[in-house]
Image (cartoon, coloured by chain):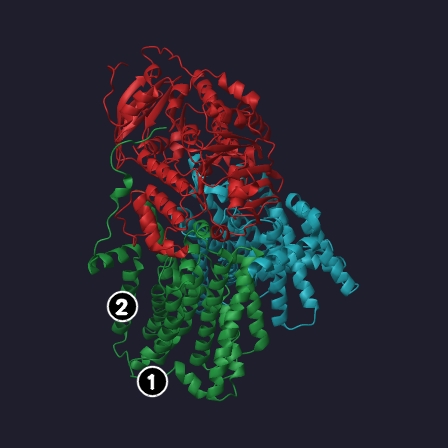
Chain colours: A red, B cyan, C green
Amino acid sequence: MSEATFLLEAHDVAKRFDSVVALKAASLQVRPGEVHGLMGSNGAGKSTLVKIITGVFPADGGQIFVKGVVRSFRSPAEARRAGIVSVYQDPALVPDLTVTQNIRLAGASVDAVRKWLAELGVVRLDFSLLVRDLPDPTLRLIDLARALAWEPAVLLLDEITASLPADLSEQIYAMVKQWRERGNAVIFISHRMAEVSALCDRATVLRDGVTAGVTERARGSEERILALMLGAETARAVASVPSTRVSRQRPGDAQAALEVRGLRCSPLVNDVSFKLYPGEVLGVAALEGQGQEELFDCIAGSRRYDEGAIFAHGKELRLRHPADAIAAGIVLVPANRLLALLQQRPIPENIALPAFGGIRNWGPIRIRSERMRVESAIGRLQIDTRAGSELRRLSGGNQQKVVIARWLASGFDTLLCFDPTRGIDIGTKRQIYALVREIAAEGSAVLLFTSELPEIALACDRAIVLFGGRVVAEMPVSEADEATLLRSAHGLAPLAQASS
Amino acid sequence: MTERAKTVFSRVVAAVTGGGLVSLLRTRTIVVLVLLLLALVAGIELARPGTVNALWASNMMLFAAPLGIVAAGQTLVMLTGGIDLSVASVATASAYLMATHSGLGVAPAILYGLGVGFVVGLINGIGVALLRVQPLVMTLGTGLMTEGMLVVYSQKKMADAPRVPQFIEDLGAGKFLGGIPNDLIVWAPIAIILIFVLRRTGYGRLLYAIGDNSKACSLAGIRVWRILLLNYVTCGLLAAAAGLIIVGGTDSAELRLAEVYLLPSVAAVIIGGTSIFGGRGGYSGTIIGALILTVLNSILTLLDVPESVRQILYGAIILLLAAAYTRLTD
Amino acid sequence: MITSSEGKSSVMAVPAASNMRLATRLRRSLRRDPSLFFMPALLIVSVAITVAIHPQFSDFDLQSLAMGALPLAFAAAAQTVVVIAGGIDLSIGSVMAVANVLAASAMEKASFEQSLLLAVAVLMAGAAIGALNGLIVVLSRIPDVVATLTSGFIWGGVALVILEKPGGGAPQEFLNLGTGTLFTPWLPNALVLLVAAVGVIWIPLRRSKLGLQLFAVGSDRIAAFRSGVNIDRTRFAAYIFSGLFSAVGGLGLTMTTGIGAPLAGVYYTLSGLAAVVVGGVSLAGGRGRMLGPVMAAFVLTLIPTDLIFLNIDPNFGQVIQGTLIVVIVMIGGFVDMERNRK
């Protein structure tokens, strides 16, 4: 196929930020009338390539061709005029303006947006509402509708279905296909293999800043994509991690490391009770917005609750600040890494942070003992420290490891992990789950929420399901397959007889 | 329009400085700052040969010390991402209160002066740390409040004419060992303690951490308000101490005594490498920054230009320094 | 991946666009912007207190009040524009001083017609200074607090160069534009001037695309950028308007004091900022109305006035203003904290 027929082509694009090379030689060729996936682990360069294509910043090397003509965009507005529009996971909407004002701001037509919103299933939206007063899924659709209103030849969707309920994701898939039927192209970025293999005609895989390969939709393409993303050896190594768990036996009179009784935190947590024992990993499965995030925040001490009690090793806790939870041995690894990390400070300072909580630790630091603890945590987690002295230079997976390393270094009884592998590449994911198993094996207790159901079985001994702010099911891992969890997560009774 | 201007600007900066200087600036800020200072000193000597000698150097230290002490407090506050616009009023008020109570003896008078710093710093701390008010607005308010109260107080206290005790005068203006300014006796220990605290203590670590991401600190179990409260109190005390030294140098407590120290205190911190957003920097850079500003001021005094032109040049040079610094280390 | 395969889309929970009654619209505006109610109330209370203290409050007193508040109101307006765009301008007072001494020295021996032309020239100079400020802030990438603090210092020096000591003057007819009462005794010229100037400059701006961009940049810079807004150009424009309003304020100073004073501006920077805060405009940017800060300027000016009527030392005025700011922001901080606790 000759170059002139590509709607968009990126050729050997390179980009570096100070000493960090984000892209070495990335290439991409998008034909009209196709949905083209862009895959790669964190740090492979996907978002950098997207930002260059859409004009957020210029490339250092290589060229971008739009319909065969070399272009270099200096702003998203310029790229938009050339027919290239991107939609990200965070809606590009200004919170203090109304929907109408946001549309006007971007120079789009209000009627066109209304029409596209209707196509996406949103019919009676009040455009005079402030964006900050609207729920997030609505905003995503408005963002997408606004993008469509510009009739772009190339539509880039960057992780747009992340944490979206299924019905909205379906609307988006349908729209993607519709856009393709018109002869346009859609570049689809996602971490979810199933989505990509269902939707994309072809997929380009990036690894370490270069294009590792391009696959066509066919049987077995998922494995090929995985292999391209990881590089052949890692793929083999990762495949060898056993994916089924054998539940541990617990002595009959063991005391719970963490017990939650009748917890209520309106509006989302209504009545949660469960026990977590030392040495086990308890998985939490739930749909979007069933109260799981609020539950974790309450246990970790960063949110007040209305009723109920939380016990650590039998002792009731008064939690008014995360420091209270930490003092009781309960620590949190939150979903949002940015919330937990000091971006400008070096890794050792990030890891050693909790040590300075008490006033008596405000004095001179014992450097040697700090260094020992920090280095042992770094070693255990295999954190890649090459990126230098500032945390923001690390990849997402490594950053997540630093958060965990912090708690390893300072010690804990109970580890709360809220979606620890969100947005992380597969290799690091497996490492983190292996680590969680190890931590439990050493005697600590782990409460793990993950939005990826199959991973419950990977790491947990037991699972509970949250629905409507209540625990509706509890089962050992042997019964916690995806189908069963999904049923309970919807509030439906399990098909088979309940055991446990 | 601005796009082209920006490219031109960066090209000029790059041409002037060259790439090597940039990485040097990032990793060893102090070296570049010291070079800049030496360049300024060399400039003076070239322009007016014979100016630079031991006496001149000792006078520079003498004048730099009060700025260095005010900038010390400002450094602490700016590391946490804040700012303190009340330092000038506090310094003036501290000097005035000390002077009007000098009849009680030197030590009680000093305590009165420091007391002002403590009280205002405490109010600032309560506002910023406990009530989450923005530091700019909070310290703006307390600065106006303090200045106003000082004016009222000065008119009520007409009877007790302010008098600067000999001890303070010696501290602020005197020298020992044939040339070392006395106020270094105050500045040097402060500098040593501050640098130690920032580099080697938990408190210092926490300042950087809070400036970088105070939410992360909460999640890690740090009670942020305690540090911030102590920090603003410390800044107030340092500003008050600086006021005592300033008044020793000028020998009369006026109501606009320390006004000229506000902008330079912020400038010294910025030039010294501390980011106004917090999380990065330190006091050693501020010290050199203070020295650079003091030398700059003396250069401008040597030029035979009216006060107004001096003001313009001073501000313009600070802008250039801060711009070069921010651009190069972004 | 856990997904919800049944039930209504969460999008449907949003209220529909029906005919909005005036009451609902009013309630919504109030909820979005509490200062819409609070500021007028505070102003009325302040005026009531003043009249209670001094029942002989005459039209002449109203005139003095308007004249006294005029420069501060313009300083507040200038600050409001920049704050809405997410920045801050600590050079406003100095720019006012430059405009003031420029006008006073140029108009000293001018005729009325000439003075009007000179006024326009001063306005353009103000906008130019604002543009320079904007260039400095945008190009140097120094945080605007430091950049404008420093540039304010420079402009202060410029004012001193133009007029070393207070002096100069302007033709009487020009001064009358800001003093006296042209229409009715109870409508001071200063008030008319204030409303006219703010209205002519701000209302078209707020309705224009640029105005939308100012709010957008102040609210969420990244979203604005992705929506196609040129951030640098918008911030630059904000400073031009700040310079323009400051120049109007400087002209107002000339009219109400009759002379030019190079050091006049020092007070107005910080007090203008205080009026913005008290007037309910969030320093975070992205929202706010001009009405609040302008009214707050009157409230702040009433304080020394009331003190004079009460025979209290007017120097207490600054104490009270400073304390008022401190108390208001502390209460505001406390209220915000309680609201976020939920």
Locate residue B249 relative to residue C255 in the image: left or right: right
Q: Mark 2 lies on which chain?
A: C
The x, y position of residue A45, in whole percent, is 54, 37
**Residue C137 shows in the view:** yes
Residue type of the residue flagged with mark 2: Ile
| Mark 2: few/some/many CA within 10 Å (<14, 14-19, 20+) | few
The x, y position of residue B24, in whole percent, is 68, 45
| Location of the C terminus of chain A (image quadrant) | top left
Count of marks overlaid on the render: 2
Question: Where is mark 1, residue-wise?
Answer: C182
Mark nearer the viewer, 2 or 1: 1
Query: In the picture, residue A308 is in which quadrant?
Result: top left
C145, above or below A205, in the image: below
The x, y position of residue B28, in whole percent, is 67, 44
Question: Where is mark 2, residue-wise?
Answer: C44
C157, above or below C35, in the image: below
Q: Nearer the viewer, residue C215 or B46?
A: C215
| Mark pair 2, 1: CA separation | 25 Å
Residue type of the residue flagged with mark 1: Leu
Q: Nearer the viewer, residue B154 or B24?
A: B24
Query: In the picture, residue A297 is in which quadrant?
Result: top left
